[in-house]
């Protein structure tokens, strides 16, 4: 083996020594975003379960008429079912990442994909469930026993002036848009930044 062959092998080894540590450092950086995402998910799970239990308990403290009460429980049940879909999805993600070691690019790629899918389910479920909350609040306010029951029935059967119907619709649409904006901001604040960090790390590794 001549001197040039030896030099070439030494150069290749030096390059490997430079590349491998850089990749290891990049992989280690992914651990922090995952830990923060997991922490936020844990808080989210506890908060959402608490909210569901609180919604089911409200009629025990506020007297509302039977019609409003029946509608209230139906809507809360639907909301809780929608919420449960993403809680299950987020819990699955927690299990997948509980003993995860991001030691390879393939594992990181799968984790980023699962995170994106989880966030899409999260946004869809949160928006869908939240759109029922204005109606639930309306039932609690207008369905109280202290309010004339005939006036409540007139509203839910649309036996009211057309102008009031239009105002109710406009108010609901404005609230729905606000819920959509807040949900997007909330999900980005809790998870979006860390998801971007993982994506950027993956792109650097590919480069």
Image (cartoon, rainbow, N blue to C red):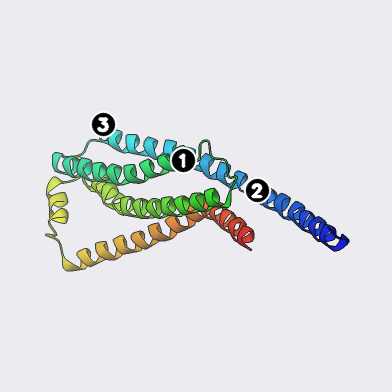
Question: In the rendered view, would you say 63 is above or below 6?
Answer: above
159 horizontally vs 50: left or right: left
Dot 3 falls on a residue whose secondary structure is helix
**Sequence-first disc among 1 and 2:** 2
> Which mark sits nearer the N-terminus, 1 or 3?
3
Q: Is residue 194 left or right of residue 11?
A: left
- From the image, tell me which residue sits under label 3: 60
Mark 1 in CB contact with mark 3 (< 8 angstroms): no
Q: Nearer the viewer, mark 2 or mark 3?
A: 2
Which residue is identified by label 1? 96
- Label pair 2/3, CB-CB below 8 angstroms: no
Q: Left of 118 or right of it: where is 173? A: left
Looking at the rendering, which quadrant does residue 53 occupy? top left
Label 1: element kind: helix
Q: From the viewer's side, name the closer residue of 6 and 114.
A: 6
| CA distance separating discs 2 and 3 | 49 Å
Percent across and percent down for residue 100 are 54, 40
Q: Which residue is mark 2?
A: 29
């Amino acid at each position: 083996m001549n001197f040039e062959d030896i030099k070439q092998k030494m150069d290749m080894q030096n390059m490997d020594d430079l590349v491998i540590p850089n990749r290891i450092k990049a992989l280690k950086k992914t651990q922090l975003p995952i830990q923060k995402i997991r922490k936020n998910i844990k808080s989210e799970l506890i908060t959402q379960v608490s909210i569901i239990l609180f919604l089911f308990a409200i009629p025990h403290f506020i007297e509302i008429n039977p019609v409003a009460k029946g509608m209230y429980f139906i809507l809360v049940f639907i909301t809780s079912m929608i919420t449960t879909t993403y809680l299950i999805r987020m819990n699955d993600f927690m299990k997948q990442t509980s003993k995860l070691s991001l030691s390879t690019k393939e594992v990181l790629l799968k984790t980023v994909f699962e995170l994106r899918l989880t966030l899409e389910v999260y946004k869809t479920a949160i928006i869908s469930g939240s759109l029922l909350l204005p109606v639930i609040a309306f039932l609690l306010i207008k369905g109280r026993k202290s309010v004339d029951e005939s006036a409540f029935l007139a509203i839910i059967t649309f036996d009211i002036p057309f102008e009031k119907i239009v105002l109710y619709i406009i108010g609901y649409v404005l609230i729905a848009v606000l819920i959509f904006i807040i949900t997007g901001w909330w999900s980005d604040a809790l998870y979006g930044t860390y998801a971007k960090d993982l994506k950027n790390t993956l792109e650097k590794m590919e480069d």
